[in-house]
Amino acid sequence: MLGSLELVYWPIRGRGYPVVLLLKAARVPFTYIELAFDKDEHHGAKQRGELGLDDFPFGALPVLKVTSEEGEAVIAETSAILRYLETVVERELVVDPFKELSPLDQARIDMVHSAALFNSTVLFNSASSPTWLEGGDRAHLEHERILPFLRGLEHQLGSSSFPREAAFEPRRLSNGGVLFSAAACAIAYTLSMVCDVFPFSLARPLAASDPRQHGTLEARFPACAAVLRAVEGATGVAEWVASGERKERWSNWASFTPDKVRAAAERFDREVVDPEGREALS
Ligand SMILES: N[C@@H](CCC(=O)N[C@@H](CS)C(=O)NCC(=O)O)C(=O)O
């Protein structure tokens, strides 16, 4: 039994996003416990050693509270939460079970999963600088971090030894949902954030509102784009996005608000696709 699931997180997209993607695509019910972001309260308690370690095992969010036949648990760390959900949803709801993966194939999948989460962490940490979205800082982030990650991911996904079906094929569930792997959700999350930060040079594959932006990730990194398109295009996810429930903000950092991201993208990222400013991208 899946039991009851409570996802505890801030009122942002952040690292809760890959977990919500997995649950929404799978149409698995859960409760989102939204903690108001009060820096002094949470961080103050953490610094004083007063944050309950049963509720916040490492002081950070998200955490998933599980009550199941196996018992009660609080799971921290995004990757552990994703792997747990992948395992229990597979056990309970998958219609056509796969045969077990070889250790090497599992490692190939774990590798792209970890790389996606690591690069998302670097991206988040960059946002502590007030100038992270501008000029030199932005170029550094793009060329030292984001593009090498995308090239590496594209290369892995295109390799003949990569177990594509096990990693990315959505698996039919008995409740009408689909299960995406932990790795697929981790990758979709990181790419989704990258596309929001670089909306002109790395536009998301599903953003068709402006034909000049459409498919830029797709054109440059098609295997990566296919993962994002599949996960964000899953019916349960698309319905959730259309409902307006998805949080707009990625982060609690003041330098990572949607208006700042948009303004900086207008000033800096558009230069990549329109260096002479000939086309007014609104
Ligand atoms: N490695 C952790 C990192 C979690 C993390 O950094 N969470 C941030 C929010 S997105 C947080 O809780 N920051 C507050 C803090 O560390 O006090 C994970 O993947 O879950």
Image: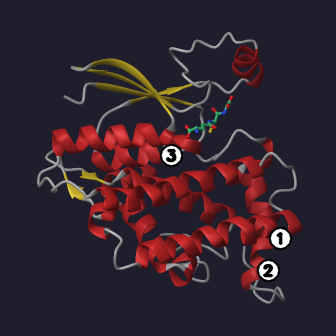
Residue at horizontal 32%, vertical 69%? Answer: 164
Q: Which residue is mark 3?
A: 17
Apparent side of residue 270 relative to residue 189 in the rendered image (left or right): right
Quarter of image, ligand 1: top right
Residue 65 at x, y percent in the picture: 41, 23
Residue at horizontal 65%, vertical 72%? Answer: 147
Answer few, some or many: residues within 10 Å of disc 3's Cα (few below 14, many 20 plus, some between 14 and 19). Answer: many
> Residue 271 has which mark?
2
Q: Is residue 226 above or below residue 9?
A: below
Between marks 3 and 2, how big is the CA–CA gap?
29 Å
Q: Which residue is mark 1?
A: 267
Between marks 3 and 1, how big is the CA–CA gap?
27 Å
Residue 197 at x, y percent in the picture: 68, 62
Residue at horizontal 69%, vertical 48%? Answer: 124
User: Could you tell which of marks 3 and 2 lies nearer the N-terminus?
Assistant: 3
In which quadrant will I find the N terminus?
top left
Q: Amino acid at mark 3?
A: Tyr
Q: Do the numbered discs 1 and 2 sit on residues whose CB atoms are within 8 Å? A: yes
Viewer can see residue 205: no
Element marked by disc 1: helix
Q: Amino acid at mark 1?
A: Arg
The scheme the figure's colours follow is secondary structure
Q: Is residue 53 above or below residue 84?
A: above
